[in-house]
Image: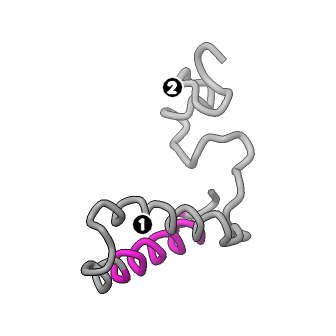
Amino acid sequence: MSTGLPAQKVMGSTIGAAVASLIVSVFQDVLPASTEIPLVTIVTFLVGYFIPASPNDTLVPGGSIGLPPSVAGGAGQPGLGIGGQGAGN
C-alpha cells in the first residue's frame, strides 16, 4: 500500500463485523449461542470481499514497504533482504 491509512476493505470489514455483532446481540434470544462467531466471521468476509479496493491500495514497486534503506537492504547495505534486495536475493 502506498499510504499508512487502513485499507478501504479493512474499514468496511470492521464496520461489517461491528454491525453483525450488534445484530447478534439484539437477537440473542432467538439465535443459538453457537452461531455468533460463525455469523460475524461470514459477514466480515463477505463485506471485505465485495467492497472494491481503494485506488490507494497499490503495491509499491520494489516492495520495500517504506522501510529505511538500512533495513530494506538498499543503498549498498545488506539489510534483511526484503523486496528482492539485500543479502541472499
Figure disc tally: 2
Q: Please identify, in this view, whether the residue under mark 2 or under mark 1 is nearer the observer.
A: 1
Question: Label 1: how many residues lie within 10 Å, few (<14), some (14-19) or many (20+)?
Answer: many
Q: Which dot marks residue 80? A: 2
Residue at left 35%, top 60%? 37
Distance (Cα) linking label 2 and label 1: 38 Å
Q: Nearer the viewer, residue 13 or 76?
A: 13
Q: Position of residue 3 (x, y in %)?
A: 58, 64
Q: Which dot marks residue 78? A: none
Report the predominant secondary structure element of the magenta stretch.
helix
Is residue 9 within the magenta segment? Answer: yes
Q: Nearer the viewer, residue 70 or 17?
A: 17
Question: Label 2: how many residues lie within 10 Å, few (<14), some (14-19) or many (20+)?
Answer: some
Q: Position of residue 29 (x, y in %)?
A: 25, 80
Would residue 82 appear left or right of 53 to someone viewing this image? left
Q: SS class of the residue under badge 1?
A: helix
In this picture, is 62 found above or below 30? above
Residue at left 55%, top 21%? 78
Amino acid type, callout 1: Val
Q: SS class of the residue under badge 2?
A: loop
Q: Earlier in the sequence, mark 2 or mark 1?
A: 1
Q: Which dot marks residue 40? A: 1
Residue at left 34%, top 77%? 24
- Furthest residue to the bottom? 26
In this picture, is 73 found above or below 10? above
Amino acid type, callout 2: Leu
Q: Position of residue 13 (x, y in %)?
A: 51, 69
In this picture, is 28 found above or below 53? below
The span shown in magenta is 4-23
Would residue 54 appear left or right of 18 to someone viewing this image? right
Residue at left 31%, top 80%? 30
Is residue 14 within the magenta segment? Answer: yes
